[in-house]
Each structure stands twice: as structure tokens, then as C-alpha cells.
Image (cartoon, helix red, strand yellow):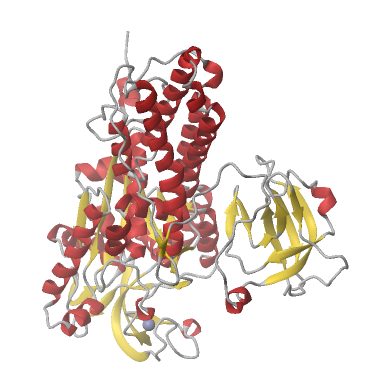
Amino acid sequence: MIYFTGKNMETKTQFFTTPIYYVNARPHLGHAYTTIAADVATRFKQMDDHDTYFLTGTDEHGDKIVQAAQKQHQSPREYVNKITRLFQDLWPRLSVQNNQFIRTTDPAHIQVVENLLTRIHDKGDIYFSSYEGQYCFGCERFYQDRELVEGKCPDHGVAPATIKESNYFFKMGQYQDWLIDHIKTHPGFIHPRQYETELLSFLKEPLEDLCISRPKSRLTWGITLPFDSDYVTYVWFDALVNYISALGYPDGALFKKFWPTARHFVAKDIIKPHGIYWPIMLKAAGIDIYAGLNVHGFWNVSGSKMSKSVGNVTDPVAVTDRYGVDAFRYFLMREMVFGLDANFTEDVLVSRINADLANDLGNLFSRVLSMHLRYFKGIVPAMTTAPDISLASDARAAIDGFQKAMTRYEFHKATATVWQFISSMNKYVDMHEPWKLAKATEKRPLLAAVICNLLEGLRTVACLIYPVMPGTSEKMLTALGMTIPEKGFFLLDQILSWGQVQPGTRLAKPPILFPRIDVPAKDGSKKKTAPADRKKDAGVTPETKPVITMEDFAKMDLRTGTIDAAEKIAGSDKLLKLQVDLGTDTRQVVAGIGRQYNPKDLVGRQVVVVANLQQATLMGEESQGMVLAAGTKKELVLAGFDTRVPPGSPVK
Ligand SMILES: [Zn+2]
């Protein structure tokens, strides 16, 4: 018999990168998010049996660095060493497991930059020319007139200086059609979809040639051009090249093994260099194009775009010290829809920690293990066959949903899927009421089955949260008496099999996973946030909320709207997709009223819309606002008016 070992023996590989971070400032929330997202993706691929390589690093050349160093009376090298150290120290504190940390001042990197420049120059795609233009020193770039706002740099608000100099340029135009075609024929190359659209729309305009040098008279802190020692290369031909120099291009074993699966994580502000310059540079040099680009949105801190000048840069170290690294990682992954902008406020962070982590997960964990300790003296009973009460099929759905979402880099959806399972486990406890079963001897086997199912469910959750919360995963698995594989996690294929918590194992008193965080009240006293009430759906006692000022209320943009169209969202019996006419514009709003209202009965109906609610995505549908309704989950009634009013009327 002949075995064709080649194909089946092949290991699946995955290479992920973050941008190399510019060391003109300390690490902030944005750096933390990109790097944690890439770390979560890497850990997931490992669970999915891939051999992974994860690269991050720092970008250390350029005039901003020289300026920052001068301000601190340091040499550029002393300065970059200091700031780079901050990044290198940060990643382990955020449980980031990068395989390599590259610096653009590394000699090996410099060699590859020279190699690439020589190749492209020899080919004739780099030429020398004089250029006069509007230059912003803050941005380190020339501006086209049309890019300026009232003659000023849009980022710095100062008029650029007119500079004339000779420089080297990279001809990109002849690769434009090839790139358009590559993007169109490789779905997922630019991810998520809206950024593919954005790039293709950039590419409708003819590409201008890219200036890739600076004369040494103006800048010396850079890599000297191999074909002209009076110049250094500038920004992209230095920075972007890190992705291949780190792997030992051209002959390194890492390059051969990992480059074909390269996927870059970036924030949306650097989509153009990564989505246009970089693939064209690779093409011009005769190197295979990377496999994909994952683009995420911005974090707004307390409502405004994060920037150093407004002093709201969130320090990831401070947040982690205060709330714990796993809680921070969970929040970042759960709160941001990958690709869209999200808000970071301490209030939202705390309420997620209290609701999702302390309450839903933490309480379930300690509740189940405490019952186990009470009813079985901490010794795992044999699983009694009672398939009709098994949680295994819910667990399978959670694993499937998690895997699907993670494969598409939908971290928010992946975590939401796990929390859906946690919520069914909480319902399972309420439904089977183990404390009642414990009172009757003949119910003993049933009690054992319920507890065993819950232990298995917790084991499943512990395995699935590994990429996002590796520390908590380990704590839970240890408390469940599981032997964690040496690599630190279970493969996806190993998770489902039911009955892995071994009968006879002794389980100790559970640790507290996430202590509830006290929220200081406005008067300075501490109060605990109200625990989520799971039982009283049917009650009419409304939850009381703190008093707000007229000013708080005035922040809400409430308007009347007329429903133009309504339809069910596939896969949900609760959600309807509404097109609502607000007078000035028509909004798509997703509303959870599908069980109470028939879509066709809603057309023409007037509703109250919260028009300035942050945009959200529900079941893949964008929702630009919310319609108001009263009642409980079962009986929801839309708010309305007894006389028709024009759409768009303010509600006061
Ligand atoms: Zn500027």
C-alpha cells in the first residue's frame, strides 16, 4: 500500500501581526486592543490545531522620534530604547504571548529593507525627481491642496510649509488594476467587508507615486538608501517591511512556513498603507501577497475620539491593575464589534464586569461547586444516565457558534455565544432546583445527573474562554479537577466529549473568579449595584434608577417616526428590521418586538425613536436607533400617540 503522506501530514499554519507601534508616545488603549485581538485570534487558532506565529514590535525611525528625543535631551537611540521597553513590558502584563518583538533598528531588519529597495530600484519602479509641496512637520508628510482644511493640516490645524526637494518615488500606478482585481477575486482579503468597499473606492482615483525618501540634510535617523547614501528611506519602505524581515526573508525557515498565511491586524487609520502600498510593494518585489488584512475601528473614550491632546488616553496598565487583566481583555473583545467604533468608559467596563463576569459566570461557578460540595461532599458522583436533561446539545451549539464567530474574527459574537450558554446553564439550575432534589433520597440519581451536567457545562465554558481569558480558564479547569494539557489549553475537538470531569475526583471550595465591584455613589458613599433579577419578569415594580438632571434628559434625541417597512430577521423570532421615516432621513432600526407584532401590521404606524443612540449591529443587521416600548419580555407594547403627528417631531 502506498501512503501519500504529503498532504495529510501538513500542519495548518497561521501568522498574525500587529502594526509595529510608533514610539513617539507611550502605549495606550488602541495599542492594547489591536494586540489583544491578535493574541486572542492566535490562541484560538492554536485551539483549532494550527501552528501559529505572532509578531508585534516598534517603529523607531523618523523625525518625530528625533524631535521627541531632543525634548528629553536624549539621543534618538536612548529615547527609542526607553519607549520600546514600555511596550515590551506591557505585553506580558496583558497576557499577550507574542513569538517575536521586532524593532526597525534591528540590523537584520535594516538588511531586508536594503534588499527590497535594491530589488525594486533595479526593476525600475523607483525613480528620482524633484518635488515641491505642502509639508506638515507634525504629520511628516506632504499634503495635496484638496486634503487641507482651509489651507491647514486636518490633524494639526497649522498651515503646512512649502518645501522643495529632490526625492525618490515609487511608481504604483502600473499595479493599480492588478490590485483591484486581487481584492475583488479574494473575498475576505480585506476584512470586514466595509473596508473592502472603502479601499476599492480609494482605488477609483488614479494612484499617485509614493515619495519614499528624505534627504539626510533634513533627516538622518533612518535607513540609508542602498543606491544613494545622501538619502534615508522614509516610513513605509521601512515600517511595512518588518512583516517579512521578522520571518527572515528571503531564505528563513519561518518565512517559508508562515508567510503564506500572513494576516495583519490594523486600525482603520492605516488601511491605505496596508491595503494599497504594501501589496503593491510586495508585488513589485516579486513576493507573494499576504493572505489578509483585519481592520478594526477606533475606541472613543467617554464619547470623543481618543487623542493625547484631550487628555483621555486610557492607560492599559492602570486599567489592568485596577480591574484585572482577564476582565480588561473580556471587555475589549465583548464590547467592540470588530470593524466598528466602540466606546470605552469606566462605567460600562464596571457594569460588564459585574453583570457578565461576577454575576452570570462567577455566581454560576461558585453556586454549582458549592452545591457539589454540600450534596456530594466535594466528590464528583458518577454521571447517571438521564439524556433528557443533558446540557450536551447546548454545549455543542455553543462550541459551534464560538468556532464560527472566531473564524470570522467576530470576537464580540464569539463571547456572546459563550454567555448565551452560561445563561442557559443558569436557567437549568433554576429549572431543576437541585436544593429540592437534595431533600429526597429517591431523587439522588437525578441530583447527581444535574450536578454532573453543570460541571461538564462549566468545563466547556472554561475551555472556550481560554483565548480571551486564559487565567480564568486555568483557574476554572483546576477547580474542576481537570489536568490541563502542557500547552495550556484543550483543542476544540477535545472539548465536547461529555463526562470528562472524572467521578471520584475531589473538588475543593471554589475560588471567587470575579469579585463584584462597588460603585461609588455621587454622595461619596459606596453602594453595591443591584444584582440582576432573574425571576421577576412578570412583576410591574419598575427598577428604580438614580435621579438625572434636565441636562441629562436633554441629551436624548427622541423623535417621532413612521414605519415604512418591516420584516423579520432570519434566524431570530424576536427581532424585526424596521425602516423608520424620521422626516429628515430614513433609519434602519432593529427592534425586539417580533413576538408581539406582525411585520405587515406595523407599516404606517407611528413610533417613538431614540435617534441619537449609538449605532449597533444585531444579528448582522445595523441598527441606527431604538423604538420605545413598554412592558415585560412577554408583553411588549409600542409607545405611540393618540393623534398623528408629523414624522421627526421632537418628543419632549
Ligand atoms: Zn499635520
Rendered position, 457 above or below 313? above
Rendered position, 446 above or below 65? above
Q: Quadrant of the N terminus?
A: top left
Q: Residue pushed farthest top?
A: 1
Residue 126 location, quadrant: bottom left
Residue 559 horizontal side relative to residue 164, left or right: right
Residue 20 location, quadrant: bottom left
Q: Residue pushed farthest front?
A: 439
Residue 379 horizontal side relative to residue 152, left or right: left
Q: Is residue 225 visible?
A: no
Residue 271 place in picture, x, y as percent: 43, 63
Residue 341 horizontal side relative to residue 638, left or right: left
Residue 586 place in picture, x, y as percent: 73, 65
Residue 113 place in picture, x, y as percent: 22, 62
Residue 50 horizontal side relative to residue 444, left or right: left
Specify the quarter for ligand 1. Answer: bottom left
In front of the other: 412 or 439: 439
Kindly identify the residue that appears in the image at 34 percent across and 27 percent down.
373
Kindly identify the residue that appears in the image at 55 percent across and 59 percent down.
197
Q: Is residue 415 visible?
A: yes
Kindly identify the residue that appears in the image at 25 percent across and 45 percent down.
255
